[in-house]
Amino acid sequence: MGVVITISREFGSGGRELGRRLADKLGIAYYDKEILLEIEHKTPFSKEYIEEVSESRPIPLFPIHYGNSWAPVTDPHLKQSIEVYNAQADIVRELAEKSSCIIIGRCADYTLRNDKPLRIFVYSDMPSKIARCRSREKDHEDLSDKEITKRIKAIDRRRRKYYEFYTGQKWGDRNNYDILINTTNANIKELADLLAGHIEKKNNDK
Amino acid sequence: MGVVITISREFGSGGRELGRRLADKLGIAYYDKEILLEIEHKTPFSKEYIEEVSESRPIPLFPIHYGNSWAPVTDPHLKQSIEVYNAQADIVRELAEKSSCIIIGRCADYTLRNDKPLRIFVYSDMPSKIARCRSREKDHEDLSDKEITKRIKAIDRRRRKYYEFYTGQKWGDRNNYDILINTTNANIKELADLLAGHIEKKNNDK
């Protein structure tokens, strides 16, 4: 297996930009939403359904912790959500085996844990997340800071719950990552250069 | 103010080695235990007393949170501990103003928060901390892994409580740092080279 880098990120922290720049710099594949398309090919479910369940954890009818324990799954929505998650995990594994790559989100750090990818977590403070959201999306223009903050928090809460449901690990807990980067006041391009240098060096040392 | 880097670290994670190498590489000052000597010069207290109270938070007679609130301080031990902490904070500020430097521990990230130092947190998993302790200290030779683990945990618990008492912030919480580095399986020399390159670049850009 080549270089595999997983990037988890808080919404608006620039993690995706960091990933894209890093992939460009290293000349390796970059996977983000592409994985959802692959799930569509591999399962009977619609694009919309996959998008929905691959962002939100299912709410089971009884307490269940998928990552660490087993319980009979009778709820059909839960069953299908787990099916989508498993298809996603298979695709993540196939992509990582195929070539060096960067994978954004998708619990890839957990799925690939035995292959020792470089696990990066990107975060920043709220004012810089708000500024980043405003700069990149036109439809945030009419929202107040308070409204954007609410949206950002809701998205991150969903990411956290999804991750924790399927992995049994705490999202953003430093022990699950190799490096955590605060992008508040940081220049993402510089960070990408820095990490690319580090990764190239590590790889040459092998 | 020049380049100021603060390093907080879990015991046995190699944070001190990273700091020393980084200071060498950048050709800047490195402060660790030296600060305790300075406190001795500036206060009426003995070396032993300073060592004791600058590692452990005082146990006040009533609940008090020094970092964020005020309460009349009547307990003499608490009073003296705070005196040592304040002398330490003054010295940290003086050193940071004097020249570019790296400061290990001492709540320096909090003391210098308005000067925007580069705040690094270094950590690793328990097996690699145990291995690092064994490799560097002869007196760990007779201890079992379980005993070393107990010691490491006790030291980190003390560090955490000391930091939280004086700063009102959570020790190791990613929001209080710019970069968190997991040294499990990492080469500290390589990490120092990497960070030095990043810091030099940032500084040239100014």
Image (spheres, coloured by chain):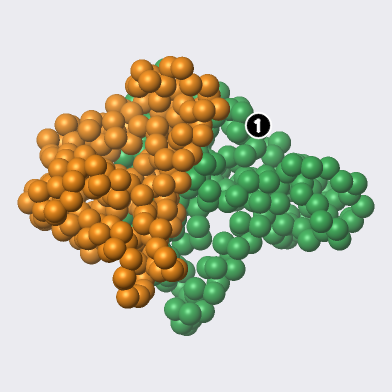
Chain colours: A orange, B green
Is residue B97 something that shows in the picture?
A: yes
Q: Quadrant of residue B99?
A: top right
Q: Could you tell whether A122 is left or right of A39 in the image?
A: right
The structure residue drawn at horizontal position 51% and vertical position 34%, both measured from the top left corner, is: A150
Residue B123: x and y in percent read: 44, 55
Q: Residue furthest left?
A: A98
Q: Could you tell whether A114 is left or right of B92 in the image?
A: left
Residue that numbered label 1 is attached to:
B94
**Disc 1 chain ID:** B
Is residue B188 something that shows in the picture?
A: no
Q: Nearer the viewer, residue A113 or B49?
A: A113
Q: Nearer the viewer, residue B167 or B32?
A: B167
Q: Could you tell whether A3 is left or right of B11 in the image?
A: left
Give the crowd class for mark 1: few <14, some 14-19, many >=20 residues within 10 Å: few
The structure residue drawn at horizontal position 63% and vertical position 61%, both measured from the top left corner, is: B158
Q: Is A100 placed above or below A59 here?
A: above
Q: Say which quadrant the C terminus of chain B sits in.
A: top left
The structure residue drawn at horizontal position 81% and vertical position 56%, both measured from the top left corner, is: B63
Q: How many marks?
A: 1
Q: Is A180 placed above or below A70 here?
A: above
Residue B96: x and y in percent read: 59, 31
Q: Nearer the viewer, residue A19 or B12?
A: A19
Residue B17: x and y in percent read: 43, 52
Residue B37: x and y in percent read: 67, 48
Q: Say which quadrant the N terminus of chain B sits in.
A: top right
The structure residue drawn at horizontal position 44% and vertical position 78%, both measured from the top left corner, is: B145
Element type where label 1 sits in the image: helix
Q: Quadrant of residue B46?
A: bottom right
Q: Amino acid at mark 1?
A: Glu
